[in-house]
């Protein structure tokens, strides 16, 4: 099932390897080469040399029935994981308040965003070195430990520490499901399969809030405790299926005499530990101070913020130098960034997520205060973006499947995002109806789903062996973008809202400015229609419109970068790609070519009485 016991080693210079196709005949090679040109030939040289080393045994022992069982199990698990993730946002304020530490909510959010950004690339490398079963097991274990620690925490320090385990586990599961989609599908079906893990969120998006409300009638601790039971239980079928295929692969290698026990020192070397440390340290020491300093006055001038930023920057520079010059098994192969679909794809997505989280972090606050909506109504509007995104990604996946191109689909998605943000900016004012804002959020959400096809384009631009690494790179860019978006939005909100309140509040209410700025509860305490409430509404609206204007400008740049990705011919790349086993779509490119050759030979023999090529 996976490659944990293989005795091969990753290719250090894949572009110097020769084409190795095992028992494939010369005619097969010629046919493959005749179908491919340009970049496809380079991909073809890489994939056969690397696929066996990194992921060749992942799919070899799968059957179509086995794949279906695996994915039914995965969707069941992801339903519970999504419910857990979405309902936890309701539990968090109650949890921190019970420790008398409600102001630490922002700090905990920073920690979560940093963990997401830093951990995904190392997790993908662990999955390639140790195997899919092992990494799913590790992530499920981390999530369960985190749930138990949170549910039993007696102090805010224990609670904050538990968040590390919990977020690492849940985000790792999400990443592993995307990698599983890449393992189990050919390119023609990959964009659609990438959307499959998100299908349960169509249900959990609307059930999480009522579920959380019912749990809170008992205790917020039970909200985490119930998932400490459910997550490992519903994960058992998936783990059993993955382990079964792992055992089949091991038995096959033993029968062939190719089985060797794992060399743990070699495995550690393949993890690129120096690169892991430099990458994690650099990204953490940049994201944490940027996020924290943006929400506090004059924080940029403090010594510890400056030191962290400098050390973080130096660490990332050292990481790049290490990966290029000395890393034997690079965590991030610099060859990935030579492909326009990769470098411009992640740039466009990073900018888009900065813009998106400028909006998402403050739209609910705007709706509650200036829109005078109930908590339920504001929450339902916030759900519209991730809900609509699922339909956008499913629709774009189907389009890619049948038209075999992706660039202009992605460009249309960024255009929809620009339209959605533009309409949001237009309708955020005192004279618009909430129905108009709802429409803009649906358009924006659908566009966000469509642009997730960028992940597919990055996977298509590299060999199958590098699929996990480039998938993690895509997801990391989203995490960095969301953290930066939160930091920029927090900085603008912290700097601008007090100024707007000072300009708009009646003189007798200026003494309450710090309380109004610091708590929406205080802001909502002023009756609708009073001069104070009108001034508060105007201040919140103008501040949010400034944030939206920044998001709108950023989205223009995201659209521009999306125009620079490659217009890949998916059919040609897929025909030249070998999957070395059963996947959704086909069992392997060489098998398909052999079928074509055999059909062609039969037709030529019948029509000409001569074998092909004579």
Image (tube, rainbow, N blue to C red):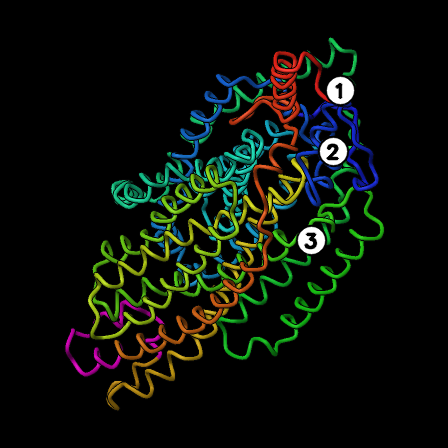
Q: Residue furthest front?
A: 608
Do the residues under discs 1 and 2 have CB atoms within 8 angstroms?
no
Q: Is residue 79 above or below residue 348?
A: above
Mark nearer the viewer, 1 or 2: 1
- Rendering quarter of residue 208: top left
> How packed is label 1: few (under 14 Cα within 10 Å), some, or many (20 or more)?
few
Q: Residue at x 72, y 24 (%)?
A: 28
Give the prevailing secondary structure in the magenta stretch.
helix
Which circle's residue, 1 or 2, is located before the other in the chain? 2
Is residue 274 shown left or right of residue 201?
Answer: right
Task: Say the numbered circle drawn on residue 337.
Answer: 3
The magenta segment: 514-536
In this rendering, does residue 573 appear at all?
Answer: yes
Residue on which disc 2 sits: 50
Q: Is residue 584 magenta?
A: no
Task: Say the numbered circle drawn on residue 614.
Answer: 1
Q: Position of residue 49 (x, y in %)?
A: 76, 32
Q: Residue at x 63, y 19 (%)?
A: 600
Give the position of the C terminus as an image quadrant.
top right
In this rendering, does residue 233 appear at all?
Answer: no
Query: Dot 3 lies on which element?
Result: helix
- Rendering quarter of residue 522: bottom left
> How packed is label 3: few (under 14 Cα within 10 Å), some, or many (20 or more)?
some
Q: Residue at x 52, y 60 (%)?
A: 483
């Amino acid at each position: 099932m996976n490659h944990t016991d293989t005795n091969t080693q990753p290719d250090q210079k894949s572009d110097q390897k020769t084409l190795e196709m095992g028992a494939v005949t010369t005619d097969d090679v010629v046919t493959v080469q005749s179908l491919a040109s340009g970049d496809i030939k380079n991909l073809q040289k890489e994939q056969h040399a690397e696929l066996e080393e990194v992921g060749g045994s992942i799919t070899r022992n799968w059957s179509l029935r086995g794949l279906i069982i695996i994915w039914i199990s995965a969707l069941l698990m992801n339903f519970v994981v999504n419910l857990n993730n979405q309902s936890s946002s309701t539990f968090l304020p109650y949890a921190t308040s019970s420790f008398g530490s409600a102001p630490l909510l922002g700090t905990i959010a920073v920690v979560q965003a940093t963990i997401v950004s830093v951990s995904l690339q190392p997790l993908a490398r662990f999955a390639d070195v140790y195997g899919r079963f092992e990494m799913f097991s590790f992530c499920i274990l981390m999530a369960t430990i985190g749930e138990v620690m949170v549910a039993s925490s007696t102090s805010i320090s224990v609670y904050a520490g538990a968040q590390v385990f919990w977020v690492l586990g849940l985000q790792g599961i999400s990443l592993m499901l995307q990698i599983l989609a890449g393992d189990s599908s050919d390119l023609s079906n990959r964009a659609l399969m990438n959307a499959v893990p998100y299908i349960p969120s169509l249900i959990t998006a609307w059930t999480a809030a009522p579920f959380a409300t019912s749990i809170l009638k008992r205790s917020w601790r039970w909200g985490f405790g119930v998932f400490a039971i459910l997550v490992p239980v519903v994960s058992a079928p998936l783990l059993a299926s993955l382990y079964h295929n792992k055992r089949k692969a091991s038995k096959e290698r033993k029968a062939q005499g190719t089985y060797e026990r794992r060399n743990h020192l070699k495995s550690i070397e393949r993890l690129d530990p120096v690169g892991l440390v430099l990458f994690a340290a650099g990204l953490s020491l940049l994201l944490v101070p940027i996020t924290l300093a943006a929400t506090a006055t004059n924080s940029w001038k403090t010594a510890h913020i400056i030191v962290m930023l400098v050390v973080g920057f130096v660490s990332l520079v050292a990481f790049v130098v290490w990966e290029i010059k000395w890393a034997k098994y690079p965590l991030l192969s610099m060859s990935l960034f030579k492909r326009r679909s990769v470098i411009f794809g992640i740039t466009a997505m990073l900018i888009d997520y900065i813009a998106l989280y400028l909006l998402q972090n403050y739209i609910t606050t705007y709706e509650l205060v200036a829109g005078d909506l109930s908590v339920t109504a504001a929450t339902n509007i916030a759900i519209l973006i991730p809900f609509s995104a699922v339909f956008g990604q499913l629709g774009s996946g189907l389009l890619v499947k049948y038209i075999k191109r992706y660039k202009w689909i992605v460009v249309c998605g960024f255009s929809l995002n620009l339209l959605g943000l533009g309409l949001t900016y237009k309708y955020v004012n005192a004279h618009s109806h909430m129905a108009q804002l709802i429409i803009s959020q649906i358009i924006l959400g659908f566009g966000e789903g469509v642009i997730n096809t960028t992940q597919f384009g990055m996977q298509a631009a590299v060999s199958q062996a590098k699929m996990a690494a480039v998938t993690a790179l895509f997801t990391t860019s989203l995490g960095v973008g969301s953290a930066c978006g939160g930091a920029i939005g927090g900085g603008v909100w912290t700097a601008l809202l007090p100024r707007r309140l000072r300009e708009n509040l009646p003189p007798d209410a200026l003494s309450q400015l710090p309380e109004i700025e610091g708590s929406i509860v205080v802001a909502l305490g002023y009756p609708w229609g009073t001069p104070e409430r009108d001034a508060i509404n105007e201040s919140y609206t103008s501040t949010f419109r400034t944030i939206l204007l920044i998001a709108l400008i950023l989205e223009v740049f995201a659209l521009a970068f999306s125009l620079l990705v490659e217009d890949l011919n998916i059919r040609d790349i897929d025909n030249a790609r070998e999957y070395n086993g059963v996947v959704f779509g086909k069992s392997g490119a060489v098998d398909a070519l052999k079928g074509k050759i055999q059909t062609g030979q039969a037709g030529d023999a019948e029509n000409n009485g001569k074998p092909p090529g004579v």
